[in-house]
Amino acid sequence: MEKVRFGVLGAARIALEKVIPAMQRGQRTEVVAIASRDRHLASAAAEQLGLARFHGSYQELLDDPAIDAVYIPLPNHLHVEWAKNALAAGLHVLCEKPFTANAAEAREIAELAAKSDRVVMEAFHYRYHPLTLRVEQIVASGELGKLKRGKHNLHILDEPTTGLDEHAFRETWACIEALRRDEGVSVLVATHRADEAARCDRVAIVDHGSVIAQGTPQELCSRVAGDVLVLHADALDEVARVLRDALQLDSRQVDGALVIERAQGHELVPRIIDTLGPGRVRALSMRQPTLADVFVKLTGRALGQEVVRND
């Protein structure tokens, strides 16, 4: 049986740990090469996976004559660009979700795929899961009789809005809320977006496969004491030491800033500026705690940090 020869654009964790090993075990797929903007990273990934070929740019991989198709696990904002480039190179495309940010981009990719006579697929594996296929077989066999109407009480949505623009985000959630309100459907959402989780009735925070906290968004946010101060400054380690010694303030470094939890946070703002001096503070803001703050407090890292890798 002839195999489809895949090249992989990017060394994302999901590619290295999940998708490429699965392709290597497949009877109809072969992973030929991997590409990264960092040639050393591409080389290391190829060695890790036993691949003979690697490329130091995405375009080099698209130009590789040994490739029939590409798998795209790049950051979401690059999906459309490199799907279009792959189609222009005459390659089939398997793209991580979301393969576009809105309906207009999806139509554009669909039209390009039709014109090029190439296959473009979004990586929703459950469509081909043995359980899904078995359900289809049972329905088609007629053993349940003639199917007249179907009704489901649970939707499971995996990252439904990750990478979407704000308009598409609002439209998606309008549909979700209509299902809940008008059809009585329960919706289970898996997401890395704190603002999306905050729309849910109850939230479970999962870290490395284990539930570490659960409750309503309000209950979880109450785990963060008071206000959240976000301080941008140079030499964060030194700034953290000064604040700890002078004001007895504990802080965490998150995304290039110091994060401080404190009740009555507005009272701290002038004290922090006076202690550090206005020249050392680039920006200082205060807000109410979010689910992203809860995740940081419980795990010590930013939400999504462990799964997003921009190579």
Image (spheres, grey):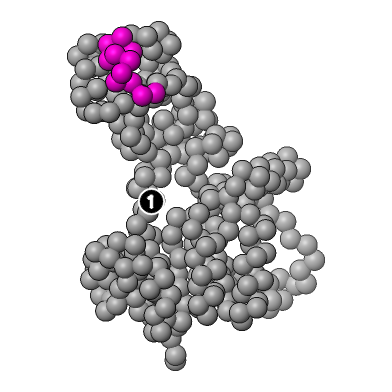
Q: Is residue 151 magenta?
A: no
Residue at position x 59%, y 36% in the image: 199
Q: Is residue 232 above or below residue 128?
A: above
Residue 134 in sight in this render: no
At label 1, counting other C-alpha atoms closer than 10 Å, the crowd grade (few under 14, some 14-19, many 20 or more) is: few
Residue 52 sits in quarter: bottom left
Image quadrant where one finds the C terminus: bottom left
Q: Looking at the rendering, in which quadrant would you find the N terminus?
A: bottom left
Going by the picture, which residue comes out furthest to the right? 148
Q: Can you see residue 44?
A: yes
* 192 versus 24 height, above or below: above
Quarter holding residue 22:
bottom left
Hey, which residue is sitting farthest bottom in the picture?
Answer: 1
Residue 213 percent across, percent down from the top left: 41, 35
Q: Nearer the viewer, residue 116 or 25?
A: 116
- Specify whether 180 is left or right of 31: right
Q: Residue drawn 40% across and 21% down?
A: 284
- Boundaries of the magenta span: 273-283
User: For mark 1, what is the residue?
Assistant: 307
Q: At x 52% / y 30%, what residue is drawn?
A: 217
SS label for mark 1: loop
| Residue 162 percent coordinates (x, y) | 53, 49
> Left or right of 16: which side holds 245?
left
- For this rendering, which residue is in front, 84 or 191? 84
The stretch drawn in magenta includes residue 279: yes
Q: Residue furthest front?
A: 279
| Three-letter residue code for mark 1 | Val
Number of marks: 1
Q: Position of residue 221 (x, y in %)?
A: 46, 26
Which residue is at 46% across, 25% downward? 289
Measuring from the top left, give residue 59's x and y in whole percent: 41, 71
